[in-house]
Every structure is written in C-alpha cells, then in structure tokens.
Amino acid sequence: MNSDRMLGLLTRIPGARSLWCRFPIGPVDLRVRFGIWHRPHYAYGVYSAADLARRLGLDGITVIELGVAGGQGLLSLEEIAAAVAKAVGIRIEVVGFDSGEGMPAPVDYRDLPHVWSQGFYKMDQDKLKARLSKAELVLGEIRETIPSWMASCRFPIGFVAFDLDYYTSTMNAFRLFNSPGGNLHLPRVYCYFDDTIWPERACHNQFTGELLAIREFNEAGDKKICPLHLLRHTRIHPARWNDQIYVMHDFTHPLYCRNVTPAGETYTQLPIGDSG
C-alpha cells in the first residue's frame, strides 16, 4: 500500500483532517493533495497556478480574490500564497478587489435580486487593512479599478477566486482576462466560483448569476472558462468545492502549447473505481 493510500485511510477517521488543519505539519504539496487547509479550494488553485508557472519558467504569479467583504478569504489567500511561494520557489502577489461599501444595487433578474441586495457584505476597511501584511486591497467599482490596476500588474494572473454574487459584477471582473497577447495571465488560469451552488433558493442556472456570466464569456471569444472535468475523481477526499473549480483557457496564448512535463516524469491512469 503506497503512502498516499495509507494516509488517505487514516484521514478518513472522524476528526483526523480537522486535527491536521489545526497542526499543519508536512509538505505544502502533500497538504494540498489531502485538502489540509482552512480554504482547500484556495490552496488547490494557488498551488496549481504556481506549479504551472514554475514549469513554464516564470518568476511569479498574481492571485486574486474578487469580493473581499469581511476579509477572511483574503487573509487565508495571503497565508496560502506565502507557504506556496516558499515551497515552489516563485513570487506570489496577492490582490483583493472590493467596492468597500457592500454590494451595489442589482441591475435586473440576472443579478438574483431575490437572494442578494444593495449593501450586503459591507467591509470594515480599517479593521481589515490592519490585519493584512502583504496583500494589496483595491477598493472601488471593479469595472473601473480592474483596468487601472492591470496597468501596474507585475506578474501574470494564475488564480482568481470569484465571489461577486452578481452576473453584472462577474462580467465586469472578466476584464482581468482581456490583456493583449495574454501577457497578464497564464495560459491556463485556475478559477474558483463561489456562487454556483449556495444558497438553494438562488436556483443557480445558466441563465442567471455567475453561470450566465461564464456562458456569455465563452460565447464571446476564443478564451473559454471550463469546469475542471471530473476533478473530484482525482481527489483523495472529494469535496463540494471540486465542482466549483474552473480553468480559463487562453488557446491563443503563446505558452499554451508548451509542454510542462519534465523529461522522466510520467503519468499513470487512476485504477478503475479509485478516487485517490
């Protein structure tokens, strides 16, 4: 029995993974594989993007949270980025975008006004700024702040967590992927879409919210945002967030077709019926 399989069995014991999260020992890549982070979806996206950048020979990446609210996610992203940067050996800059004033007024039914409304998730800006160490907090309407921020972006975007709730806000956020020649993003950008499952009363579908934004983005051009197909079947401990991981594919990116499998590294198929 290999070590991952044995550890997989041990971490199925009730409370084992929670205990491991409280005392996070072990290599970063091992903890990513087992989901041993307070936000394992962020850890997966950041590590995957950093590993891709390293394999492409890049010096660093930018990771982003869209919709910061109280700041717990951005603080976690900051912590994860520091650990991954040290493990992988590249620089990782962390950026959070938010209006700072809570959600704007919904435009129409596509923004799911039966679930969210103006003023939800207002930020205590001073409190959050005091807790951040290195992350950049960009405040204002994202349709205005994203273009100006992109002019000063130093490393390509590798991971984006979308937590904007609205269709219109998510569409505005996709401006992050509009850099000419793909110079401001990796050829494959890992994405997490928070508002595709909860709450049930939202009745999420491809005609409203984030799912509509994804569909219209895909219909508009050569870049495509796709679910990471059957991700949960490759995970040692499948979880709900596996279905919320997407990848933005820029098929025209100059590095899209560069092989990222080093000489001597091989891939093996998952055994039939195995999820880990």
Image: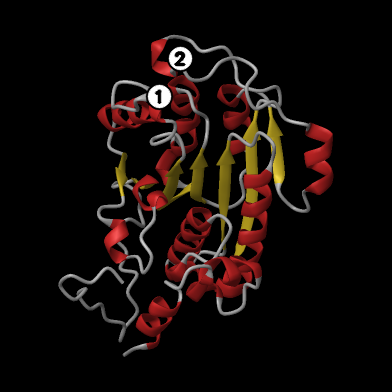
The outermost residue toward the top is 108
Task: Name the front one of labels 2 and 1.
Answer: 1
Left or right: residue 267 versus residue 48 is left
Q: Nearer the viewer, residue 178 or 208?
A: 208
Q: Quadrant of residue 83?
A: bottom right
The disc, 2 or 1, on the residue closer to the chain's N-terminal end is: 2
The outermost residue toward the left is 272
Q: Are marks 2 and 1 in contact (CB under 8 Å)?
A: yes
User: Residue 9: x and y, percent?
Assistant: 38, 78
Q: Nearer the viewer, residue 265 or 275?
A: 275
The outermost residue toward the front is 14
Give the residue number, with chain letter if any, for mark 1.
201
Q: Quadrant of residue 109?
A: top left
Q: Residues within 10 Å of mark 2 (few under 14, many from 20)?
A: few
Q: Residues within 10 Å of mark 1 (few under 14, many from 20)?
A: few
Residue type at mark 1? Answer: Arg
Residue type at mark 2? Answer: His
Give the residue number, with chain letter if any, for mark 2.
114
Query: Quick one: quadrant of the C terminus?
Result: bottom left
Distance Cα–Cα, label 2 vs label 1: 8 Å
Residue 136 appears in the figure: yes
Q: Quadrant of residue 90?
A: bottom right
Left or right: residue 271 versus residue 45 is left
**SS under mark 1:** helix
